[in-house]
Image (cartoon, helix red, strand yellow):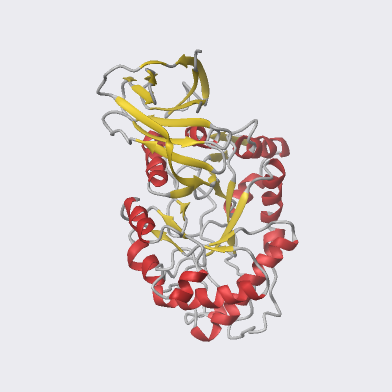
Amino acid sequence: MKKYVEQWFSSEDGRRYTISKQDNLEFGEVSRGDQKIYVNPGITYQSITGFGTSMDESSVYNFSQMPEKSQNDILHQLFDPAQGVGWNILRICFGSSDFTGRPYYSYDDVPEGETDSDLKHFSIQKDIDYRIVEYIKRVMEINPEVVVFASPWSPPAWMKDSGTMCGGSLLREYYPAAARYYRMAVQAYEKLGIPIQGFTVQNEPLMDNGSYPTCRFTWQELSAFVKELKKEFSAHGLTTKIWPVDHNFNMAMSYGARMLEDPEVCAAVDGFSFHDYLDEPTEMTTLHFQHPDKPIYFTERSVWGTGGVDRVIQYLRNWAKCYVAWVTCLDNERQPNSGCHGADATFVVRDLEKEGGYYYIPEVYLLGQLSAFIQRDAKRVECNYGSRSFVTAAAFLNPDDSVVLVAVNQDGWDKQIEIQCGDQQIKPRIPARTVATFRWAKN
């Protein structure tokens, strides 16, 4: 009986292929070749939660400036699993991040010099007024399977030794109040029909920057705060998972693993989250083998081109359960951005030179080569990585028993390769600077 393999391509320039269906291939007899990717669906690793991006205030602002039809088209293209690329994870900010055009805010701002230990002024109304809640709910209507997780850039200024959201540390005396504050934020979102499934505790906890919301925690301080947070969540029946670190790979062992030395913290932590601005993804593997019961989530960095997709493959091959990009839509002047970190092109670019104009960058389709084919709860399976001079790859077994292989050709010339699964193989040609996805039935 003949067995066929479906194949799709997307190209780095976004012009030749945009998740373009190619002719099916037929499995044939195995031959000897040096350029080969081996896939073994019988050996499985971590499950995959999915792929996604942030619903930050800057992105929401740019969406809101477009015609309603454009907004709907964009949201369906990004999140619709049937008609679009099917992203199924959203990262949201509890309070301001640096990507906003509005004054920085928390959910409990009081005049300078005042405090509010009883949190009488707590409100997420600004998230409603700025339409953040509205756009999250619109995404959830398009894709009800979307997982929403939250990251704070800073607690309220009055809780900190700096007296400002921009820099400084959370005062010990306010650890219980801050835990209540974040519990109330989770509950406020849940009341609006938006369950917060994960909470990263503090975005980039070793950052202490006076130009945008940051809050510094040593690993010892964050450990103490996680204990307060867990007690608060448990006392109010919250099921939101606690995923600390939310910073670079170099902190996997020097920060995350150190936190787990305390048995109480170890019991409170449900997993770890990481960004990619320092060190290598292999640090996640080191942490995984020391604490295999703590899932790993990749929560921030945008990547570009075929080299970027290769980097995402590295995250997944190093035990990350997801890939989440940072900032979805800026304008073509890279705004709004109130912080000190410059921005590159986002998935969607609002075109200020055209009334209601926008365009996608190729990365929507390049990342779609993973998100449109790898189902939630798929398992990563045994597959050799390949090499930069050949192609790089990762493979997955979907819940429907389909096998998905994603292969990346970063070079400027076509590559003829062999993909072997069991005692059969295919011999596709992958065009220059292209991501290729292959899907076939396991049995």
Labels in figure, total: 0
Q: Quadrant of residue 431?
A: top left
Q: Quadrant of residue 209?
A: bottom left
| Residue 156 is at least partly visible in this image | no
Return the x and y of residue 274 as percentages of the image width and height.
Answer: 43, 57
Above or below 34: residue 211 = below
Q: Which of 75/62 is in front?
A: 75
Above or below 308: residue 273 = below
Return the x and y of residue 123 as percentages of the image width and height.
Answer: 70, 70
* Residue at the image point whose x is 41% and y is 57% from the top: 292
* Residue at the image point whose x is 36% and y is 70% from the top: 258
Q: Which of 43/417 is in front?
A: 43
* Residue at the image point whose x is 59% and y is 44% from the top: 88
64 sits left or right of 368 in the view: right
Return the x and y of residue 331 as percentages of the image width and height.
Answer: 55, 44
* Residue at the image point whose x is 37% and y is 17% from the top: 427
Above or below 325: residue 223 = below
Return the x and y of residue 202 as percentages of the image width and height.
Answer: 49, 67
